[in-house]
Amino acid sequence: MEIGVRILLAFLVPQVARVGCQEDGGHEGCVPGFQVKHYQVAYSGPFQKGQALIQVEFDDCAGNEDITFEVSDPSFYVDGDLNLVPQRDVLYSSPLLFIHGLGAHADDMAQVEVTGLPGQLGHSLRSILGLGQMLPHRSKRSLLVPPVIVTENQRAPFPRIIGKSHLISRDEKLGNHIFRLTGPGADQDPKGLFTIDIDTGDVSVTRSLDREAIDSYQLEVSTTDFSGNIIEGPAILVITVIDQNDNRPIFKERRYTGEVLEGSPTGTTVMTMMAFDADDPATDNAALRYNIVRQSPDNPSSNMFYIDAERGDIVTAISPVLLDRETLPTTTYELEIVAKDMAGSEVGLTGTATATITITDKNDHAPEFTHPLFEAYVYEGSTGVVVNLTVIDRDDPTTGAGRALYSIINGDPAQSFEIQTNPDNNEGMLSVIKPLDYEATAFHTLLIKVENEDPLVSDVGYGPSSTATVHVTVLDINEGPVFFPDPLTVTRMENIPVGSFVASLNATDPDILQMQSVRYAVLRDPAGWLSVNPVRGTVNTSAPLDRESPYVHDNKYTAVFIATDNGSPPATGTGTLVIYLEDYNDNAPYVVPSVARVCEDAHDMNVAIVGGRDKDLTPNAAPFKIELGTQPGLDKTWKITRVNSTHSQIMLLHSLKKANYQLPLLITDSGVPPLSNSTEVKVQVCVCKKNKMHCSSAHSHRASLLVLLATLLLALSCEGVKMQPELYQDFIRFLCDVTLMLTADWSWRAEKKREKDNSLVPLSRFPAGQVEAPSAELSDRICSRLCWIHRWRVSSN
């Protein structure tokens, strides 16, 4: 076992040295890099911080300018004098340290062996080299594959040898094998990154590595014969990529914002800055330190804020008294923050961000009125803003600490005023919300208080300047007369005589201090029924009042009057008069429907139910009395039976033939005195077959009689019937009189028919029809014809 370890070290140390010398290509003279590749440090106890352990020899053959060194153990670093120095007290160290020197003209690595560590050396080396167990014992040969450490970002030329695989054999002939390398980075993605010399076992890298992309590779090394059969292995080859400080710290945002309340104690945390470094977090390459490099503005102190170098917390460094928003030159401060890696050393890379800090307001100043007394003037009867109250508040007007709230604390018992805050300028707008009356009160004194939305801090209170007095003077204007009561309601009977008294209007002038007169006039009288005395205001009728008029609604008639004073300029007022009209029995009742139908062979002798209608109201309307007319003989054929207070039943006492019959009726209302109306109901007796009703034409027997007389006259004239002239002349005159009488009667009935409801309550199963009276034009033509015949007969005789 000890022999194997010594052989391994014998090969490993020259190998590390060889990596650093690949670039020089064997030139003589100065060789850039470590002049000594292997160093030893004896461990006799914990290494003390700052204690120089050894001094390495490094020369880039160009003056050693801008050379950086990286140690595999971040507990150590190489100072400016090339001494290997602990950064802190180190109780225990790795048995092997690797120092990487990098400059513009050199890129090399050296090894430091720490001896005398507690425990067995063989065990420590075995752990570092990844052997873990005893080397396998073979009778002829064994494959030794030590781990490889490679620095990222190496420069050309490539390929560059970084390690070697060894075949240890007791045989003398060693050329009967081939080295083979497999795994990610060799024959797997990323392919071709590493290669192996098939004869010597030298492992090379073909291009620069990036630790931030892949920080280690695990490959397999094996040996095969020339036929491809595996002889030794596979053995694991671990290639570790050593970090270089090639990434700057990056802030997640370019600008950060924070705020702190004015008067905050020193050390109050405002915000935290956070940067990220992609380098190895186990090394100083990613050890960040924060610093404030600029504050704008830089007064009252250039160090108002402090940042924790390691955590990035920004805290206040100024006293609470100086951190006063109202006295500071600005409420916003801008800090330039720099994050530097390498634990803040001079060679560290930097990243920059801006922190904007706002000093927020607290309510430490009470608002104060600019004047103790404000004056306002307002015309009586008007509303709106009358005065703006101005205040001063040193706090931020955009916050609750500076926004003002106004209130009226005295002088407004009728709540005629209101005060609100103008959001644009924080002023108090005093408004009149109920019109003021000069005659009642010409002067008002208000006490106004102003406060903030937010409560004041405990050591600040509201003083006398937070209240103000407002004098409001009311200016007089000429006000229009006022009617009382409005509306004025009276009750009157319809149809009272023209000129009757209706009501007395009462309009008074509010301007009691001015002796003014009032005159009245009608402004709106829809039916033209009323007149008013312009001086006294008495209202009389100028036309009959009609409750049934379309201008009357719900028995009420409404008129509007105007009153005008003699002020300058004159002012007016309006008032309403409502007349409740009582009913007078001035409308006769009538019967509906006016037409009824019945089948001539009907077994049911009930013809129809008719009802009474009246435009008047109870008690001048129903109950109605409906009875047969006074013509003789009606009671032999017809009968009227009362159904209720408004309807009666018409009945036939015997069957009638198909024809149209005029049934005279008399209807009487219940008014005092009662009114009666003689009317007729046309009864059509029809032939009923198969649910159809066949009735005579709409003309009554009177029309048929007229036609019959005309036909008789024509027959007499055309047939040459002999008649004495005196008798014939009297007969013609009779026919003309009858024709004119019937024409007038039909015209009157047609007019009444249009005014009445013609709905029928039939008792038979057939619907009622509509009946029209003969036209007056037809009757005139018949009468003219008769007169012409008469003149022709006289002239011919």
Image: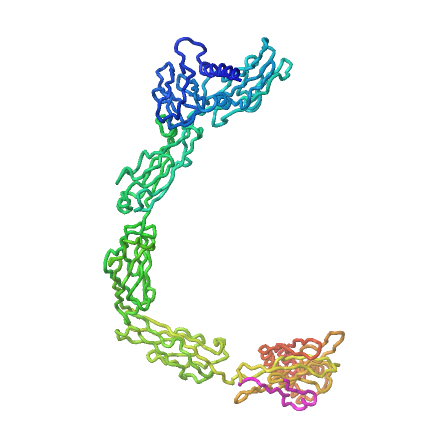
Colouring of the image: rainbow
Q: Does residue 284 show up magenta in the picture?
A: no
User: How many numbered marks are there?
Assistant: 0
Residue 651 in sight: yes
Q: Residue furthest right?
A: 690
Determine which quarter of the picture holds residue 527: bottom left
Q: Position of residue 167 (x, y in %)?
A: 56, 14
Residue at image position (35%, 42%) is 269
Residue 738 x/y as whole percent:
63, 85
Point out residue 212 in the picture as x, y percentages from the top left corner: 47, 28
- Which residue is most to the bottom? 632
Q: Which quadrant, please, contains the C terminus?
A: bottom right
Q: Residue at x 42, y 21 (%)?
A: 99
- Nearest the eye: 394 or 363: 363
6 vs 440, left or right, is: right
Closer to us: 129 or 57: 129
Q: Is residue 6 left or right of residue 743?
A: left
Along the viewing direction, whichever of 284 and 106 lies nearer the viewer:
284
Instruction: Say whether residue 710 is visible.
Output: no
Task: Please give the range of residues in magenta.
Answer: 619-643
Q: Is residue 433 above or below residue 234?
A: below
Would you place residue 59 above or below residue 436 in this image? above
Q: Quadrant of residue 439?
A: bottom left
The image shows residue 716 at horizontal and vertical percentages of: 71, 83
Does 624 lie within the magenta span? Answer: yes
